[in-house]
Image (tube, rainbow, N blue to C red):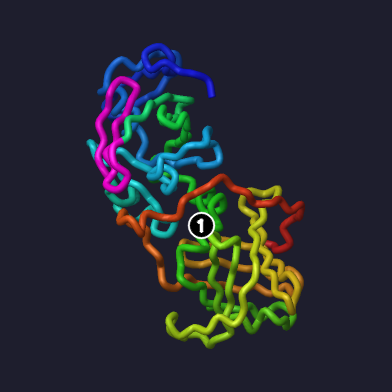
Amino acid sequence: MKTKSILLGILGLVFLSSCYTEVIIEDDYLVTSPVHTDDVLQSFDLWYVDINATDGNGEVPFLQNAFTVSFRDGIVYANNNIVGLGKTGNGLGIDVGSYGTFTGQIEIDHDIDGLWLLDLYVVNNNTLEIHDPRSNTSYFLNGYQRRNFDYDRMFYENLTYFLQEYTAWEKTFTSEEGAINDFDAENYMRFFDDVGGVFQSSQDGNGTALVNLVWDYEGAYQVYDTNEPTLKTLTLDYDYLGNEYFELYVIDDSTIELYHVASGTVYEFSGRGYIQYLKSDDKTGKKRSKSNNKKMNVSRARSL
């Protein structure tokens, strides 16, 4: 990563006030005061942490865990869950610490991770680089207002995390269309990533209490990217069935749809047992990493 100077190397900003109190960011001007640095941070409601753009081998834990961060009047907010994003904390997430600004720098006192002095750079009109000089690691944040946040991008770029935010997924709908197949009998699923992309399934009847579920089968799963950003595919490796192949669609933050391509059957699964990541040591969220989804060269089989 190239060396930058806080005083001379920041991509500059000009803040023009108006009766609408909007902040306009322009290139090629130097940030000259902590006030302007804070204006940058507050110019968007939500900053999406583009984990795939991270540069460096170090880690800032609270940025590594967060899907979005927000800065409001000295308070740092984070959405460590996808579920509830747009609703939790009026869309900003939960209060995770406090911050102060210097010229081109931000000091964050995180409730769990402690004190961090980070360098702040502007990449373009809606992208910030937050650089940790201790580990020489940069995170890139994309700015959105709550009214135009790209929720589709959030869900489809982070599907494996979304699947793990519920204790179980219960089948709540099966289409009349479609050939009878072995997957018809599977009524519950749950997903784990920290043990190598493992899923479990259960044939227990609908309405079974989560604590009473018997997980009949355990196997490997894989989420695939395709040529379309909102088309993901899913394979479930059943030894006795072979790989079951689905197109996976997000309906909302508690419902997914699986289209079983071989049979033409549509299934809906609803999340049960929401796992909320707060700011206690054991509930700070799953650590995100760069996507390692394999790519599947397929066309959408289901007509929407």
Image quarter hosting the C terminus: bottom right
Q: Can residue 287 be seen in this snapshot?
A: yes
Q: Nearer the viewer, residue 152 or 102?
A: 102
**What is the magenta range?**
97-115
Q: Residue 277 appears in which quarter of the rendering? A: bottom left
Q: Position of residue 46 (x, y in %)?
A: 38, 41
**Residue 204 sits above or below residue 228 on the image:** below
Q: Amino acid at mark 1?
A: Tyr
Determine whether, in the image, residue 108 is placed left or right of residue 235: left
SS class, disc 1: helix
Residue at x 46%, y 63% (from the top left corner): 165
Q: Position of residue 11 (x, y in %)?
A: 44, 18
Q: Residue 22 appears in which quarter of the rendering? A: top left
Determine whether, in the image, residue 210 is placed left or right of residue 113: right
How many marks overall? 1
Q: Nearer the viewer, residue 176 or 82?
A: 82
Q: Position of residue 288 (x, y in %)?
A: 49, 49
**Residue 101 sits above or below residue 245 on the image:** above
- Residue at the disc numbered 1: 161
Q: Nearer the viewer, residue 143 or 94?
A: 94
Image quarter hosting the N terminus: top right
Q: Position of residue 271 (x, y in %)?
A: 47, 70
Q: Residue furthest top?
A: 8
Residue at x 38%, y 19% (from the top left corner): 13
